[in-house]
Amino acid sequence: MTSMLKNRKVLSGAHAAAEAMRQIDPDVVAVYPITPQTPIAMKFADYVNEGKVHTEMIRVESEHSAMSACVGSSAAGARTMTATSSNGLALMTEIVYIASSTRLPIVMNLADRALSGPINIHGDHSDAMLVRDSGWIILASENAQDVYENTIMAVKIAEDKRVLLPVMILQDGFITSHSAETMYTFDDETVKKFVGEYNPKYSLLRTDNPITMGPLDLFDYYFEHKRQQVEAMDNAKKVIKEVFSNFSKLTGKTYNYFEGYKTEDADFIIVAMNSSVGTAKFVADKFREKGVKAGVLKIRVFRPFMDEEVVEKLKNAKAVAVLDRAASFGSHGGPIFHDVRSAFYESDKKPKMLNYIYGLGGRELSVELLNKVFNDLIEFDGGKSMNQVQYLGVRD
Amino acid sequence: MNLKELGNKKIRLSPGHRLCPGCAAPIIAKLALLATDYDVVVANATGCLEVSTTIYPYTAWRVPWIHNAFENAAATISGVETAYRVLKKQGKIKKDIKFLVFGGDGGTYDIGLQSLSAAIERGHDFLYICYDNEAYMNTGIQRSSATPFGASTTTDPATDKKPGKMEFRKDLTEVIAAHHIPYAAQASIGFLNDYLMKVKKGLETKGPAFINVISPCPLGWKTDPSKTVEISKLAVETNFWPLFEVEHDKWTLNYDPGENKKPLMEWIKVQGRYKHLLKPENKWVVDKAQAEVDRRFELIKRRCELDKDQ
Ligand SMILES: Cc1ncc(C[n+]2csc(CCOP(=O)(O)OP(=O)(O)O)c2C)c(N)n1
Ligand code: SF4
Ligand SMILES: [Mg+2]
């Protein structure tokens, strides 16, 4: 199959996001600076001020106002995007929930960065995990190419009438956002055609058909509305599949909720999200060379989380290591581990499972550390007793 | 515009809402919508007006309306207004629409001040009307920075040891004027034509406009619900709430009671929130409040006089 990803570029993850945004050409972007998101906002601001997009940019005074303005803009029927990181996401969290509850298809890039405190600017997933249950669809990106493709697909997923939920695209702060990689982009026309026009059913600007948005909703209806939100997330499962399949026609690649790398016959699998997937693939290959059937399961869609799919992909393995770049204080293991382990509860066939908390505050995940993970899995499978939850690369 | 003309116009905030009898907030909102023939979109900060007009599945609003959260009405309207400009440029929207915000004093003076200040600085085209009932009423009459000196609230109650709030209120209209905003004003529904004129001006203004309206709250102020308009008038006649306008830095005093200025006590004695001030041992509080009201009125007056012949 021929790919429409024809233009070879060297871009950082942040600039890949900005490039996708330029081609999507949204109506409104409201954004506030925070490292490591800033190169997205700055690059996009260049496009705005150079007249390369028709977007109106709102240079707000805080992330809280960024998301608030996005809610206003999207409610007024404009295609709306933003981007943030860490504390910025924490500050806007109140409105992150309101955006999804109001069923507004806002698209946001998140350059993942550790939450304060102590303050730190480097990548971990504590920010994304803060809004894990906010009702946003969450797509994860291994590299700049994924950021670019996920951002374009996000628009179609969010705006689908069966969904109408906001979508967040994750990339690791600095590791992905600031490292230039070779990647491939579409022509502008291809993106324009793929995302199409945004014509929402309701808008605040239809003054002849006035609507009330964001009313007080008490015990007699709130629950039903939450139930509808749950259903929208369920519908998203189908819609995401459709969008993946339509997007495949442009790229010649296949997309899935969980994308296996040499997992089909694998005995030992690492489950990871964002940039660590790349390192894990490299290490899996090294183990393959040694005759160990190693594989990697990459999470592309973190929310909605597809239990059946993750079970399907992992059930034949002997032992699985789930990597979490965020702690979940006071519970057994990290947030991704909770999801994966829980998915197996009804399954007759289940692999042994370990959880590794790693990379907090941007601590490097080296090849050596991942060697240890695969070696652990082998020994664990061989009967060695081990703590189920371990900390990778931390000084004791 | 006279009352008769107003009476013939379509009411865009319908009756049936659940605000308290005698509450000034819905009067302020209804009159603002009557003052203009434009299509409008309204954003509302969390507070009494918002919760009592939109209990799902009902709504009292006959215009498009959005409530986002407590502190972000100005940021929300920034988004709506920006969307309008973009979509209009693309030809997707044809008509002229005006953007109106209603926020309480809590949502405007306090938690929402940052987002309002920034929306003004960015120059969005909207009119923000603060209905100032001088406390967080929706959550049960708690102190705000708009609560006046000597008033009793549930978080700073008058007791034998402390006669209510011991700080002077924030002068938000002046803070807003300091943004060199195209239009800022203070108004009262006790001066109807003045209020309607200011709403019209605010909506005609290109760019941001702000009107601060004193908003008697019978429940929180412990006032007679049938006296809301009179009390609104008293606020002005005692110089507690001066009526003035600031148009591109030009200050104008709209009403000066001069010799007929009423003592602050007349304003105090009709409100239960000041009940403790009637005790002889609290006379000093009344005196101090009076002195500050006089001082602030003089400051505004002097400023307006400076600009008179501009
Ligand atoms: C972030 C946040 N903090 C607190 C509240 C609780 N709250 C809702 S309305 C309100 C008071 C509103 O006061 P004001 O703006 O003066 O309006 P009023 O109710 O007096 O009309 C408060 C404290 C909230 N909804 N959101
Ligand atoms: S509490 Fe006060 S402001 Fe709220 S509805 Fe009642 S009278 Fe109006
Ligand atoms: Mg109030």
Image (cartoon, rainbow, N blue to C red):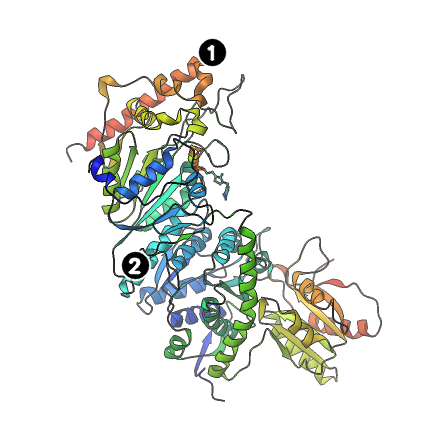
Vertical side of A25 occupied by B154: above or below: above
Distance from Cα at disc 1 to Cα at disc 2: 59 Å
Tags 1 and 2 in contact by the CB under 8 Å rule?
no
Q: Chain of mark 2?
A: B
Residue B205 image offset from top left, x and y in percent: 24, 46
Residue B54 image offset from top left, x and y in percent: 43, 46
Q: Residue at x 54, y 68 (%)?
A: A235
Residue type, mark 2 in image: Arg
Residue B59 image offset from top left, x and y in percent: 41, 47
Label 2 secondary element: helix
Label 1 secondary element: helix
Q: Which residue is mark 1?
A: B281
Q: Is residue B247 visible?
A: no
Q: Residue at x 44, y 45 (%)?
A: B71
Residue lying furthest top = B280
Q: Which mark is drawn over residue B85?
A: 2
